[in-house]
Image (cartoon, coloured by chain):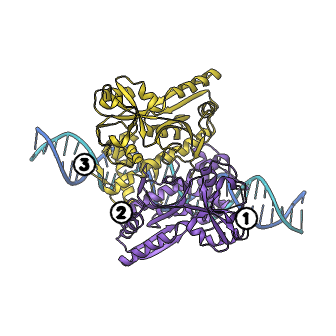
Chain colours: A purple, B yellow, C cyan, D blue
Amino acid sequence: MGMDPHLLRTFVAVLDHRSFSLAASALGYTQSAVSQHIAALEADLGTRLVERRPVAATPAGARLMEHAPALLLRLEAARADLARLHRAPSDRLTLACSPAALGAPVARALARLRASARVDVEVRVVGREAVIEEVLTARADLGLLDGVAAPSDPLPLPDLGPTVTLAASEGPLAVIFPDGHPLAERDAVRLTDLAQAQWIDSPDTAVPLDRLRAVCGADGFRPRFRHLGTDIHGLAALAAADHGLAVLPLPLAAALPGVTAVPVRHPRLVHRTELLHPADPSTPARRLTGLLTHRDGSRVHEDAD
Amino acid sequence: MGMDPHLLRTFVAVLDHRSFSLAASALGYTQSAVSQHIAALEADLGTRLVERRPVAATPAGARLMEHAPALLLRLEAARADLARLHRAPSDRLTLACSPAALGAPVARALARLRASARVDVEVRVVGREAVIEEVLTARADLGLLDGVAAPSDPLPLPDLGPTVTLAASEGPLAVIFPDGHPLAERDAVRLTDLAQAQWIDSPDTAVPLDRLRAVCGADGFRPRFRHLGTDIHGLAALAAADHGLAVLPLPLAAALPGVTAVPVRHPRLVHRTELLHPADPSTPARRLTGLLTHRDGSRVHEDAD
DNA sequence: TCCGTGCATTAGCGATACTGATGGGCATGG
DNA sequence: CCATGCCCATCAGTATCGCTAATGCACGGA
């Protein structure tokens, strides 16, 4: 059957490091072992996967790279899922959060949680992909993920296995303009009118531009400026200096300095945050879930395979 | 790192067969090897996974069973995906289809395809899960999957990796009543009014009842009669004999003998069929895709990881 | 009690998967 | 043009692994 996860792991490492020797030391192997791993994979699949000198993916290798990381993540997720069954009950809560998901409602829910019981809380603000990873691998007890969707539609999430998704909240969207920008006076804007504007692509803090394109069904939203990381204030600074526009949840956007938030009127979209939790959450996680969902949120769907 | 796919495969086989020895002969191993596989997995994960005598899953084993089959499928999918890159161009087309997805539009598109070029066609009508499996593992070149969703919403599909989903068509839904049933005179029905009726659960031919529950946001739709397989005519016979109701696409339902199809008015839902195709489809597959989508269907979304 | 059935255990052997050493292609620099 | 360094391929050697075959042991039925 082949396709040993070890081989896939070194395959990914080799392409990540663009080097056999670096991958080897990163994985704690000798360079020889890595070379043999790649050779074994290539023999098994009957194709060259890695171009050497310089080290790069062949077309087949690139295709495999669309599968391998997801596979390895799922493997780790399965292991983490079983490990959770036997962990001691804890009064720690680790929450993984995408930046725009951490707003006042979440902060208030955490406050209520801590008021009702002694719980040590750790909040990790990380990128959207990383939120999923942290929950699946049990490095976090819960995840909060934000995105944009049609009202009461779920966010499109990849392959979560037996993880459950609950709706935490929905709210309006806004575009941020530099203070004094002509459009900043408006009551509302239509996104499709802005498709050709200058946009900042900040895939982890704001709504990713490819998502805007998909959800508007329109072309445009071409990024000329890319902002990586999870720091919304940095994004605001860039937007205030007129580097481009971005879409954020309205309450959050309204509080940012140097920019004016204008609600999005059309298409009818909402900023949505969803709660990711594993099949059997810890006690503090369950309580926070209750606090976050029992007012307006309701169970939306469960992902199984 | 452990979690060798071989071990997972025999784990799944053991629980499927409820027997070590049967699993062994099914996999071409000795019983001893299977015993060692399970022992190795249990040692690796630090938990008992399988209860012996009788052979059954422990809670941890059940949890692992939520991951293992999906993992193995993905592995096979990755392998199939790479294999496709090197296959010879072919004038065969294998189409995997859920029963209600194979209607007049598809038949006409196939006719146009065969009129324009010499193509040997094989259509396999199988359950919904199996459609996905066949496409992912390259046993089929294309898949057609039907389901119910809000208008222009995509169907909720699990974990497709780099496979692409296109909208093939949308149409009205209908409930089938036995001829002469009091409600069969109606112009239209509300699904929520029927939540407490007798339903036949036919998850592969009709709309699965759990999906109805989810999409109506209502309880009810409790099955007292279960119909397995992919034979819509059989379902019609059961419905005609008053065993219960079922939801089908209207054009198809209207043509069934012994039953009357009444359109669903509320909630506003459509019967939707989607086309599943691999990252690099064969030439006949590409042509059929064009024939199926270029009138009203349009690209809806792509699943990547 | 005596079998029969079915999983566990053990011994042994061939295959596997590493390490360390060596070889060879390719770029860079004198 | 050759010398050098870098980096991957290859090879030999060895410890471990993963299989089979044979045997052991627990349980259930007549």
Q: Which of these two is toward me, B263 or A93?
A: B263
Q: Which residue is mark 1?
A: A182
Q: Which of these two is toward me, B261 or A115?
A: B261
| Chain designation of label 2 | A
Crowd around label 2: few <14 · some 14–19 · many ≥20 (10 Å): some
Which is more N-terminal, label 2 or label 1? 2
Across and down, in percent, residue A225 comes to: 72, 62
Q: For residue B99, say whether it is visible.
A: no
Across and down, in percent, residue A57 comes to: 67, 51
Q: Which residue is mark 2?
A: A85
- Kind of residue sitting beneath label 3: Pro
Element under disc 2? helix
- Kind of residue sitting beneath label 1: Pro
Q: Nearer the viewer, mark 1 or mark 3?
A: 1
Q: Quadrant of residue B227?
A: top left
Q: Which residue is mark 3?
A: B54
Across and down, in percent, residue B71 comes to: 47, 50
Q: Do marks 1 and 3 share a chain?
A: no
What residue appears at the point 35 percent right and 26 percent down from the top-left corner?
A: B259
D13 shown above or below B217: below
Element under disc 3? loop
Crowd around label 1: few <14 · some 14–19 · many ≥20 (10 Å): few
A45 shown above or below B178: below
Crowd around label 3: few <14 · some 14–19 · many ≥20 (10 Å): few
- Kind of residue sitting beneath label 2: Leu
Across and down, in percent, residue A218 comes to: 66, 48
Mark 1 and mark 2 residues within 8 Å of each other at the beta carbon: no
What residue appears at the point 61 percent right and 25 percent down from the top-left corner?
A: B113
| Chain designation of label 1 | A
Mark 2 and mark 3 residues within 8 Å of each other at the beta carbon: no
